[in-house]
Image (spheres, grey):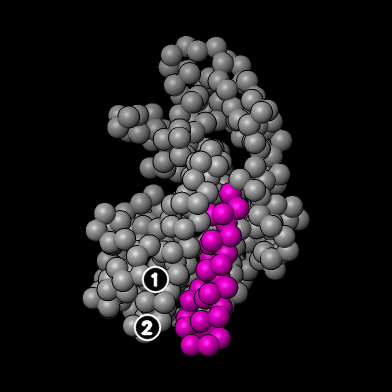
Amino acid sequence: MTTLADARIVVTGGAGFLGSRVVDRFRKAGADVLVPRSRDFDFTNQSAAAEYVRQSAPDIVVHLAAEVGGIGANQANPGRYFFANMAMGLHLIEACREYEVDKYVQAGTVCSYPKHTPVPFNEDDLWNGFPEETNAPYGVAKKALLTMLQAYRDQYSFNGIYLIPVNLYGPGDNFDLETSHVIPALIRKFVAARDRGEPSVEVWGTGTASREFLFVDDAAEAIVLATERYDEGEPVNIGAGSEITIKDLVTTISRLIRFDGEVVWDSSRPDGQPRRMLDTSRASERFGFKAQVILEEGLARTIRWWEEQGQAGV
C-alpha cells in the first residue's frame, strides 16, 4: 500500500484530458502534485528528463503523457508516435531508477494487443501476436516500456507498474477531426450536421468493428487506486468490460444528438482492429476497480459538454 497523503507526485500529462482528473484526485487525497508541461520540459530528451526528476525529487511518478490520435493520425505519424512515446518512457524510467523514486506508474495502451486477440483481451495474451497495423508503432513502443519495467524490477527492484487503459472518452476530450478518436469525432460531425440541416454524415469504415469505451473519470479513479494499492509487475487492464460495434455506437450517438439524416459508410477507410474488449477481472481483484459510468450516460454527458462548451472554443 502506497500512502498518497503528503506524497510528492509528478504527473506527466497532468494538464490533459485524463491527467487533470488524476491530479485532482491526488490533491484531494492530500498529495503534493507537480505537473510538468511539455512546452517547458522535453522528456524525449534524456538529459531533460533526468534533470527534471533530480530537481523535483518526487516520491511517485505517474507517466500519462503521450503523443497519440485516431486511425488517421496514427497512419500519418507512425515514426513520430513510436519515437516520442518510446523516448519519453525510456528516459523517465531510467531517471526514476537513477534518483531512487519510490514508485513509477506507466500508462500503456490497448493498441499494444495483437490484432486478432480473443475477446475479452486477457493480459496474458499481450505477446501472442503483432498489433493492428495502423497503430502498431504506437502500440509496440508502449509495450516495450512494460518489458523495461519488468527488467528493472528484476535487476534493480524498481517498483514500476503498468496499466492498460482502453479507449477513453468524456467531456474535455480532443475534438479535432484530424487527431481525435472515434467518439469525439462522431459527436462533432453529427452535431454540426444537425445544426446545419445537412442530409447525411460520412463515417469511416464498415461499422463492423467493435470497441470498448471507458469514461475518463472512471479511468482516473482506476489510476489513483492502482497507484495507492498495486505494487506488482504484471500489467493490468483498465476498462469497462463491455463492447459495442461502431455501427451501434453511431446509431446511439445520432439518436442522442437527434440527427435524422443518413449515415454514409466510407468502406475505403480502415476499420482498425476487428474487435476490442478487455478482461477487467485483474483490476477488480488486485486493487478494487470497477467502472461506474455506463456508455449511454457517458455519451450524453460528453455530447452535452460539446454542445454547451466545446464548440465555443472552435
In which quadrant of the rendered image does the C terminus lie?
Answer: top left
Q: Of 46 and 32, which appears nearest the observer?
A: 46
Q: Which mark is residue 92?
A: 1
Q: Is residue 97 visible?
A: yes
The amino acid marked with disc number 1 is Leu
Does the segment drawn in magenta span residue 68?
A: no
The amino acid marked with disc number 2 is Glu
Residue bounds of the magenta highlight: 135-163
In the image: residue 258, left or right of residue 209: left
Q: Which mark is residue 98?
A: 2
Q: Which mark is residue 77?
A: none
Does the segment drawn in magenta span residue 141?
A: yes
Tell me the CA gap for discs 1 and 2.
10 Å
SS class, disc 1: helix
Where residue 164 sits in the image (x, y, percent)?
A: 56, 61
Residue drawn where x is 61% and y is 35% of the image: 249
